[in-house]
Image (tube, rainbow, N blue to C red):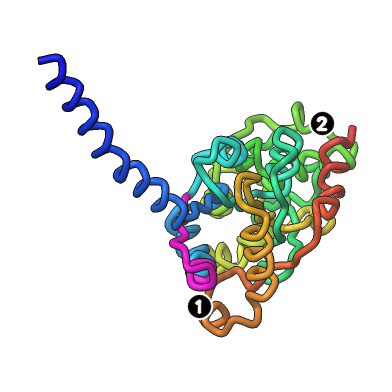
Amino acid sequence: MIFSNIWRYLLSALLCIPVFAGQVAAAGEKLVLVSIPWVKEEALQSAYAPLGELLSRKLGKRVEIDIASSYEEIGERINHRAADLGILGPKSYVEAKDKFPALIYLATCKHPTPYYNSLIITLKNSGLGSLTALAQTSFAYTEIGSTSGYLYPRQMLRKAGLNPDALFSRTYFLNKHDKVYDAIAKGAVAAGAVSSTGMKDAVEKNGDVYRILESSDPIPSNAVVAGPHLPPDLVAEIREILRGAEQDQAFIDSGSPLKGFLVKDNAFYDIVRQERDFK
């Protein structure tokens, strides 16, 4: 009986070996790329599908696109190897890099340039013509993790001598930039903070109804990062694929809002660090 149990245990262990090995090999053939949730998930999946296809085709690995539930989540997921690559906003990138210094910068997205602006906007017919006029009005941010939907607009207000914590009668967090555009167009809020990259779509949807009260200096666009658990040669290969994306005909023809990638370095985001630390 004892020998029978021993043989049963050994047989079970031997049967488990190829299953475990197969799981490890399969994981090595897939990369998970996760993005910040700055607009609706369907829009992001569509926008990043051509990037996933480009990387998959060039690397010979399946690249799975996932959308994080928060701006802070990506660094944690990469740190715990639950994701391999990430697309982070400028603020979320510098914060993730502070928390996880081994995080590897790969490139900066072009939409179509590697810069964009934070906008404080209202309606053309709102009667609001300056930042000062926003006193005791309602205002919408996206979320605290957002660069253009929270960090930069608050600093623009401070630089104008206004206190963003006491200026408004009511403050909302709507999570997505397109939701802020829509809320302003519907008159649900008097003004709000958005990314300039969403203005074209918002005008197509709601009409030419927006007035820009203030625009930030250019902000480096979203950063593409890699986890330190990836082999250095694979990281280098991915960086070169991103660098050459503008010459890849299939990627060009894909219609992706991403028009390519600028390869710089971590210091490219120092301007965001300076803005974050401005008092």
Q: Which of 69 and 58 is in front in this view?
A: 58
Residue under label 2: 163
- Give percent across and percent down for residue 117: 75, 57
Q: Is residue 131 above or below residue 52?
A: above
Q: Distance between the residues labelled 1 and 2?
A: 44 Å
Q: How many marks are shown on the rendered structure? A: 2
Query: Residue at left 64%, top 49%?
Result: 88
Q: Which of 263 and 228 is in front in this view?
A: 228
Q: Nearer the viewer, residue 184 or 74?
A: 74
Instruction: Indicate the secondary structure of the residue bearing disc 1.
Output: loop
Is 273 covered by the magenta stretch? no
- Give percent across and percent down for residue 254: 50, 78
Tell us which disc is closer to us: 1 or 2.
1
Q: In this view, does 185 lie above or below 83?
A: below
- Give percent across and percent down for residue 151: 74, 41
Instruction: Indicate the secondary structure of the residue bearing disc 2.
Output: loop
- Amino acid at the residue labelled 2: Asn
Q: Are marks 1 and 2 in contact (CB under 8 Å)?
A: no
The stretch of residues the image draws in magenta is 53-66
Residue under label 1: 254
- Give percent across and percent down for residue 42: 42, 57
Q: Is residue 243 above or below residue 130?
A: below
Which of the 4 image quadrants contains residue 259? Answer: bottom right
Can you tell which mark lies on residue 55? none
Q: Can residue 125 be seen in this view?
A: no
Left or right, 156 with reference to 149 = right
Query: Residue at left 77%, top 57%?
Result: 220
Q: How crowded is mark 2: few (under 14 residues within 10 Å), some or many (20 or more)?
A: some
Which of the 4 image quadrants contains residue 172? Answer: top right
Left or right, 64 with reference to 270 = left
- The image quadrant where one finds the N terminus is top left
